Image: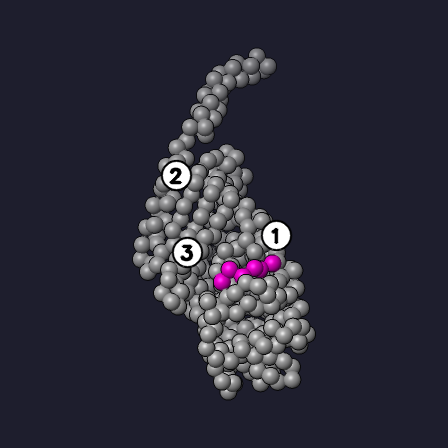
């Protein structure tokens, strides 16, 4: 028996070595640059019908472990509308230092196709997994992503500084791969959040420099059932009292999901009386109306209980924000971009 095993082993050694050498050299000599070019062309094809399509750039593509790919220097440029004076604005740059994806081998033995992915970006890490066979499942973990390094946030604040770190957990299952049957949970926590610094001007040449707004911790949680992701909690601490509710009706094409959220917030009395600038901009607890409240957008959102109410609605790829209250009768002012 031992002699037979030795003969079989000697015969199997050559094809085994051939397969090993073939796989190793294929791994080393694979045309990864062609993969990069194909990915860019496919992205452009998918965005061809978009009115103002984003632009994708990838510096380099290489191997990741044995069944994966890694891309470095990934930039997604999204165009921005022109300024009120007609001047063009630089596009928003969503930059990733490193992105990788890998096909998991062990689940294949059970007949399941599962891919894992991750990225190093914005001072933190992004990790997740996607099960592509049977009931689809999406898992996403985001840790220590810094708000100040997210250029879309900076664009919203006209370049004013933002501080804070983000933690996000998403676990979503699509039975039979259908978004209309999706179930799962969502949780996002932002810690040590602060906006503005009292120096950076927003709103153009005639804009304002808001005082530092220390929000502290902001939490948002949600649960999905039958394809509808409902917001179960939205709250904050510090200078901003925030609450809200609503839902996102999921579609098979995620960007086409329907958003319908109500958000209400007000600034704390301590914040509005902390400085003369805060009093001028946001008013006082005694009833003095601030400049912000006199703008059309905020004047239309002010409620009797002191909260500003806004509605966020539309498809996910193009949501709109609008006042959701009857509005106050404070006279409007100009010189601040509304």
Disc 2, SS: helix
Local secondary structure at mark 1 = strand
Residue name at image x 58 percent, y 54 percent: 146
User: With respect to residue 144, does 196 lie above or below?
Assistant: below
Q: Name the residue under label 1.
A: 144
The picture places residue 132, in percent across and down from the top left corner, at 47, 49
| Residue at horizontal 49 percent and vertical 58 percent from the top | 152
Establish if 311 lies above or below 163: below
Q: Is residue 222 left or right of residue 55?
A: right
User: Does 242 appear in magenta?
Assistant: no
Q: Mark 2 points at which residue?
A: 35
- Marks 2/1: CA distance? 30 Å
Farthest residue to the bottom: give it: 329
Question: Considering only order in the chain, which callout, 1 or 2, is on the residue closer to the N terminus?
Answer: 2
> Residue beneath label 3, please?
90
Which sits in the foreground, 135 or 240?
A: 240
Q: In what quadrant of the picture does the N terminus appear?
A: top right
Residue extent of the magenta highlight = 158-163
Q: Which of marks 1 and 3 is in front?
A: 3
């Amino acid at each position: 028996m031992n002699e037979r095993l030795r003969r079989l082993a000697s015969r199997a050694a050559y094809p085994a070595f051939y397969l090993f050498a073939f796989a190793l050299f294929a791994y080393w000599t694979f045309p990864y640059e062609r993969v990069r070019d194909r990915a860019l062309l496919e992205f452009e094809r998918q965005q061809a019908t978009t009115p103002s399509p984003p632009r994708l750039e990838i510096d380099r593509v290489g191997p990741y472990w044995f069944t994966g790919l890694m891309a470095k220097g990934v930039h997604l440029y999204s165009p921005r509308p022109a300024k009120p004076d007609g001047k063009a604005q630089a596009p928003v740059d969503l930059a990733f230092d490193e992105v990788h994806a890998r096909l998991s081998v062990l689940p294949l033995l059970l007949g399941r196709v599962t891919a894992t992915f991750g990225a190093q970006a914005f001072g933190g890490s992004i990790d997740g997994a996607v099960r592509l066979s049977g009931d689809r499942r999406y898992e996403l973990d985001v840790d220590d992503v810094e708000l100040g390094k997210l250029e879309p946030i900076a664009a919203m604040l006209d370049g004013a500084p933002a501080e804070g770190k983000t933690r996000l957990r998403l676990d979503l299952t699509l039975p039979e791969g259908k978004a209309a049957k999706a179930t799962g949970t969502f949780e996002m926590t932002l810690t040590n959040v602060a906006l503005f610094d009292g120096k950076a001007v927003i709103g153009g040449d005639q804009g304002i420099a808001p005082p530092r707004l220390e929000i502290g911790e902001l939490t948002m949680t949600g649960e999905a059932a039958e394809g509808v992701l409902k917001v179960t909690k939205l709250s904050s601490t510090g200078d901003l009292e925030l609450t809200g509710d609503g839902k996102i009706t999921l579609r098979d094409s995620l960007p086409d999901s329907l958003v319908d959220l109500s958000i209400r917030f007000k600034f704390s009395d301590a914040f509005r009386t902390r400085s003369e600038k805060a009093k001028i901009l946001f008013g006082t607890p005694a009833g003095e109306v601030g400049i912000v409240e006199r703008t059309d957008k905020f004047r239309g959102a002010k409620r009797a209980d002191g909260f500003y109410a806004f509605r966020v609605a539309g498809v996910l790829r193009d949501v709109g924000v609008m006042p959701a209250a009857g509005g106050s009768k404070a006279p409007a002012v100009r010189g601040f971009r509304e």
